[in-house]
Amino acid sequence: MSTAPKEGTILSRVEQRGIEPVPEDQRNGSPGQLFWVWFAANISILGIPLGATLIAQGLNLWQAVLATTIGAFGSFALVGIISIAGKRGGAPTLTLSRAIFGVRGNAGPTLVALLSRLGWETVNTMTGAFALLSLIAIIFGTSADAKRSPFLTFVCIAVFVALTVVVSAAGHAFILTVQKWATWIFGALTLLVAIYLATTVDWSSFIGNAPGSASAFLIGVGTIAAGTGIGWVNSGADMARYQKTSVKSGSLILTAAAGAGIPLVVVIGLGSVLTAGNSTIASAADPVAAVRSALPAWVSIPYLIAAFAGLLMSNNLSVYSAGLTTITLGIRIPRVYAVVVDVVVTTCGALYFTLGSDGFYGPFVTFISLLAVPLSTWAGIFLSDMIFRKRYDSDGLLNLQADSPYWYWHGINLPAIVSWLVGIVVGFLFVTAQVSKNEVWFSGPLAGSFLGRNGLAWLVSLLLGGILYAILHLLSKDSVAVRSSSND
């Protein structure tokens, strides 16, 4: 019987496991490890535009902080709950999803999950390049404008991508170690910037601002949830699959919620403070440069280093998950090669948007709002299934043939697929895809309702998907039981 190698020995090796479930005797993880993973992945400069969005929606600072706390802690609690499935089944999230949707039916949710990961990685890479470009501009006096320095921009993107590949390709154990040290080092730099702002910002200019409406507050909570935990919800089990089976489920929920929630409240709060004191940040095409211009050089340098590193830590985890998702989709390549394919796609996307796009906030918020609907619907179904399912068939998760226990009807579990599609269609009825004040991609017929106005389409999708799946699942079980008894 094989035993799990010690963590220290894994650091010099590349993880060879793909989506195969981890044997119980090789699961030696603890919830504390996941705390550092989620903390480091969320010390990201992308919290700045989210904070700016809250202020732009009319919230005052205290409302923005409260909305961030509810949205971030709450949405990552869902990530923690899905991590429990990773502990039970020892497999990546989307691989476990085969048990719910069927080995063929799972292709739809897996493809959406992959698009989500690719989108976030493109934004991470693009913004990471902005941070490095700004850092070089301060040190060497070069232009921080990406379009004026296309070659330097390409180099910055290449550096970010290369560092991502090194960590993501190495695998699980290396990520655990890197994320833990990154939390301490770059968390301290972020704290330095926070302390500077707290002691120098003119609080009197905005601290007493009138509160925004209840509707704006609800929209703010939804925006934060969609832009934080909902975006990670389909990666919950990817790291938790190495957790000991004896780990308490509550510990996984707490470490995900606190590990991600604490840095998100700090970083998004920074974005809210900066925007409240400088309204031009909310409309900047390059959020990194906009924040840098609001800080003195001695604060800008640690800020940019922390920004670059935070984006890198987030990207490491995202690319790792995307590699597993790519394999789950049916592309039969080693995990390391899946990582390379993933970063090639995101590099091309980053180059296009960095050198050819004029806006940032509008497309960014619209992107996360649109993807929140299918992701939330999937999450509702997955969470609902966890009520009925306590174990997963390890061999069945990898068997794509008709004799798989997860073959169902032609490889599709109809209750899950029907619930997912209905949840998506109904969810989009409440969505307005608005990139800017004058540019609206589409608006659902119920977008003007209370739920639509308050940005709650993702919640409608989550609840509808989960409830409908539970009903259809129970009805299908009853139907099978009736047929069985009549045959007897």
Image (cartoon, rainbow, N blue to C red):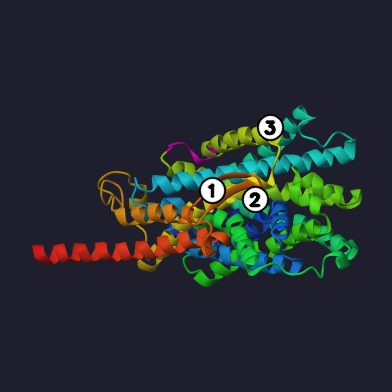
- Magenta stretch containing residue 174, yes or no? no
At a point 79% along the width and 30% down the height, the residue shown is 149
Is residue 335 rendered magenta in the image? yes
Classified by dominant secondary structure, the portion drawn in magenta counts as: loop
Q: Label 1: which residue?
A: 321
Q: Is residue 379 left or right of residue 290?
A: left
Towards the viewer: 370 or 80:
370
Q: Residue at x 60, y 48 (%)?
A: 434
Q: Position of residue 44 (x, y in %)?
A: 70, 53
Disc 3 to disc 2: CB gap under 8 Å: no
Q: Where does residue 5 sit, x and y in percent of width and height?
A: 54, 53
Name the residue carrying label 3: 356
Q: Amino acid at mark 2?
A: Ser
| Mark 2 neighbour density, 10 Å: few (under 14) some (14–19) many (20 or more) | many
- Counting residues from the N terminus, which is met first, the one under dot 1 or under dot 2? 2
The correct choice, above or below, for 249 with respect to 404 in the image is: below
Distance in Å between CA atoms under marks 1 and 3: 28 Å
The kind of secondary structure element at disc 1 is helix
**Viewer-side label of 3, 2:** 3
Q: Compared with residue 85, is residue 158 higher up or lower down, i.e. above or below?
A: above
- Please provide the residue range marked out in magenta: 331-336
Secondary structure state at the residue bearing disc 3: helix
Crowd tier of the residue under label 3, counting other residues whose Cα lies within 10 Å: few below 14, some 14–19, many 20 or above: few
Q: Amino acid at mark 1?
A: Ser
Q: Quadrant of residue 197?
A: bottom right
Disc sitting over residue 195 in the figure: none
Residue 95 visible in image: yes
